[in-house]
Amino acid sequence: MPASYAYLGPEGTFTEVALRTLPEAATRELIPYVSVQSALDAVRAGEAEAAFVPIENSVEGGITTTLDELVAGAPLTIYREVLLSITFALLVRPGTKLSDIKTVSAHPAAQPQVRNWLRNNLPDAAWESAASNADAARLVQEGRYDAAFAGEFAAARYGLEALETGIHDAENAQTRFVLVGRPARPAAPTGADKTSVVLWQRDDHPGGLRDLLGEFATRGINLMLLQSRPTGEGIGNYCFCIDAEGHISDRRVAEALMGLKRICLQVRFLGSYPRADADVADVRPLFPGTSDDEFVSAADWVARCQDGRF
Ligand SMILES: O=C(O)C(=O)Cc1ccccc1
């Protein structure tokens, strides 16, 4: 298997910075791709062992390109996640003044994080979306746009200077990134894990979403993400991307997935992997009656009843 990780490039993205925080990245060749799709396709084609892409940010929610690829593309599995705090720098060609800036560019997910700053400082600048924040910096270097919102670290790479740093409308804005590979056995549970799935309802009925959520609730499983995505089959047709606390090898999670498999049209397992916030998170105490031991003894009890040994 090629020892390389594909990532959303070009060089100098927040994605690259987040990827380099993973110890395993030090032993891999890191290859930038022009889009989330092309990085994921490199994995599907066997050109890269895994791909590292943004999936969610705390201001705007899901990064829809990534979610839609994981929902509808050839199956892939999430193995790791990384959380990165994000503030932007306004990068310009040397000598550019604020009053010279007519066009600004960045990844679409950056816009909600700098909207107020733009309103207050560059209310007339036209927004131009780029494939990534570093790509916006590259386009500024080429003279296509006047300024880019990107990491301050991207300035040197693209011969730009930071006219302003520390730009963030929301304090503590974080972006979550995932390492995605071809489907294989999940890593062993760590005690602070997360399981990601996509659910498609069998039919439209009152309380349908509550029925899906109930499979988690009755087993004491907390949810960390619930994002609906259109199925593409008409207005009102959605599937649900869910991150739940726990690992598929935890009995309560496995039983919840079995319940969902029985009642959903389709369930796509996206992986069980260690939580990036495990150090700081108060790992929630288990809801009474939901430990592996309690599932095992309940199953034993049913078996004994079936046997007439109760
Ligand atoms: O990694 C980047 O630089 C990206 O373009 C993705 C992104 C977008 C917005 C915030 C963090 C990462």
Image (spheres, helix red, strand yellow):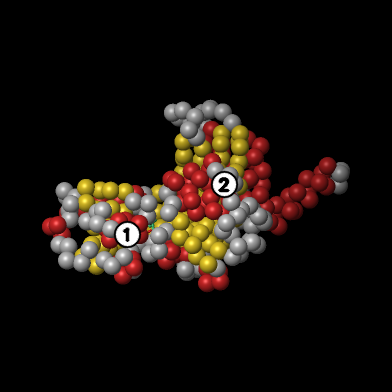
Helix, strand or loop status at disc 2: strand
Corner quadrant of residue 4? bottom right
Residue 19 can be seen in this image: yes
Rendered location of residue 29, percent (x, y) = 53, 67
Q: Which quadrant holds the N terminus?
A: bottom right
Rendered location of residue 90, percent (x, y) = 25, 61
Farthest residue in the front direction?
Answer: 142
Left or right of residue 305: residue 280:
left
Q: Which residue is mark 2?
A: 197
Please tell me the numbered disc located at residue 138. Answer: 1
Q: Which residue shows up at 40% across the image and 54% down it?
A: 57
Q: Earlier in the sequence, mark 1 or mark 2?
A: 1
Kindly identify the amino acid type of the residue bearing the numbered disc 2.
Answer: Val
Kindly identify the amino acid type of the residue bearing the numbered disc 1.
Answer: Arg
Q: Give whichever of 225, 13 is nearer the camera.
A: 13
Please tell me the numbered disc located at residue 9. Answer: none
Which quarter of the rendered image does ligand 1 occupy?
bottom left
Mark 1 vs mark 2: give the one in front.
1
Q: CA distance from mark 1 to mark 2?
A: 36 Å
Q: Give whichever of 259, 272 is nearer the camera.
A: 272
